[in-house]
Image: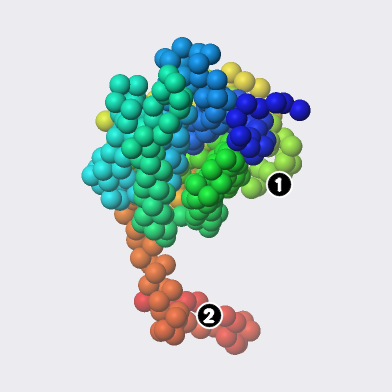
Amino acid sequence: MIHWLSDYNYDFALASIPVQLLIILFYSFRRNLPIRSSHCFLAVMISNLTMTLADIVSCEMNEVWTSFPMWIMYAINMLYFLPFLIRGWALFAYTSEVCGAFRKLGRWFRIVTLIPVSVGVFLTLSTPWTSAIFTINPETGYHNCALYQTIYFSTYFYIGASFVSLIVGWKGLRKRNRVGLFSCNTALLLGIIFRKLFINTLVTSYFSIIVILIIFFSAENPDLFYDRRIGLFNKYAFALICDDFLEKNIPVSAIMVSAHDFDTAKHLYGANQIQRQLELVSKRIKGITPKTNIFYLGGGRFIILSRENADTPELTARKWKRQFERQLKLSNETVPMTFTVMLIPFDILKREIERIEELINFASGRSYHENQRGNYAITEAILSKLQREKDIEAALKKALEQHRVEVFFQPIYSTGADRVVGAEALPV
C-alpha cells in the first residue's frame, strides 16, 4: 500500500490513468482524420491525462510545500488548472465541430465562446503575482482565492454551450453522434457536480474517462473510417474530410476513379482476384498522388481530394487519367478491368455538398459513357441531367402517390396468328 500524505482519495483518478494512456497510444498510432474535430478530441485526451497526473502530484506536494521552491509549487498547481480549463473548451469545440455549430451560428459564436477559457487561462497564469485563483503562503501552504470558482464557471459554460451546439445541429447528426454527444456532456456535468459534492475524492478523472470512451467508441475510433482491406479511408471519412475542407474554404477538386462493370467482373473472376486488383489500383493511385487524401467508396470506386489548381478541370482530368493509365501499364494486372475517370470541380463540389452522395453515384454511373465521348469532368450541362433525373423521379413519385399515372398502349397485331400478340407503350 502507498502511504499518501494528503487526505484525498485517489482511487478513481489512479484507475483512469492506464485507460487514458492506452487510448491515447492507440489513437496516436492509427491513421486519424485530418480534421478539426479529431484534433479537438486529441486535445481532450491529452489535457485530461495531464490534469489527472497534475492533480495527484499537486495534492501531495501541497502537504509538504516547504520542501520545494515556491515557483515549483505554483507551476505544478497551474499545471492542474490549465488542462482543466482546456479540457472543458476542447470538449465543447469537438461538439461544435461535429454538430457544425461554428458554421451555422457564424464567427461571433466562435469568438464569444473563446472568452471564458481565455479569461481562465489569463487568471491562472497571473496567479503567482495576483493570487487570483490560488495562493501558497510560506507559512500556511495552499489556499483557494476569490476567483477560484472561475474554473468551474468556465466548465459549466462550455457544457451549456455544447448542448446549444447539439440542439443547433441535431437534425444533421446520425443517431450514434446524437446519443454520444449528449451522453458525454451529461457525464462531464455529473463529474463536476460529484467533484463538488465529494471534495476529498478525485472523481472528475473517472467521469472524464467515461466521456473519452463514449466519444471514442461512438465517433472517433479510427477503424470506423478506414477500409483495412484496401488500406484507404472509406466513404464516411470522405464525407467528413470533404466537409471540413469546404468549411475552411480550401480549394479542392474530387477525382473519381471507377471500375467499369465492377459487379460483372467480380462475378467472372471471383472476389479474391478483384480484391488483389483493387489493392494494386490503390498502390498506383498513391504513386500518382502520395500526399493527397484517397478514399475507397466501395463497388470499385476510388476518390481523390486534390488541392491542385483545377482552373481547367477537363485538362486536369485528362492529365490525371494519362498518369493513371501509365501506372497501370507498368504493373501486372491480375484482372483486365476498365477504369474511368471523372473530376468534380471545386465550385460544383462546394455547391452540391449537401447531396454529395447522389452526385458521386451519378458521376460514377455516367463516367464510362462520358469518357467515351471525351468528357472527363462534371460540367453544368452534365449536372443539369442529374437535376432532370431528380425532377422526373419526384414527379413520378408524386403521381404514383396521387394515382395519376396513365400509360397508353398500342396493340400489336399478328397477321400470321390473326390475333393481338402484344402491346407497346406510346410516348406521351
User: Is the N terminus in the top left, top right, bottom left or bottom right quadrant?
Assistant: top right
Question: Does 399 sit above or below residue 270?
Answer: below
Which of the 4 image quadrants contains residue 125?
top left
Residue occupying the point 60% across, 82% down: 421
Q: Which residue is mark 1?
A: 267
Judge left or right: residue 88 versus residue 190: left
Are discs 1 and 2 less than 8 Å apart at CB? no
Residue density around tag 2, few if under 14, some if 14–19, many if 20 or more, within 10 Å: few
Q: Residue type at mark 1: give it.
A: His
Residue 423 is tagged as 2
User: Is the C terminus in the top left, top right, bottom left or bottom right quadrant?
Assistant: bottom left
Residue 288 on image: x %, y % = 48, 21
Observer able to see residue 322: no
Residue occupying the point 33% across, 27% down: 131
Q: How many marks?
A: 2
Residue 42 on image: x %, y % = 50, 32
Q: Secondary structure at mark 2?
A: strand
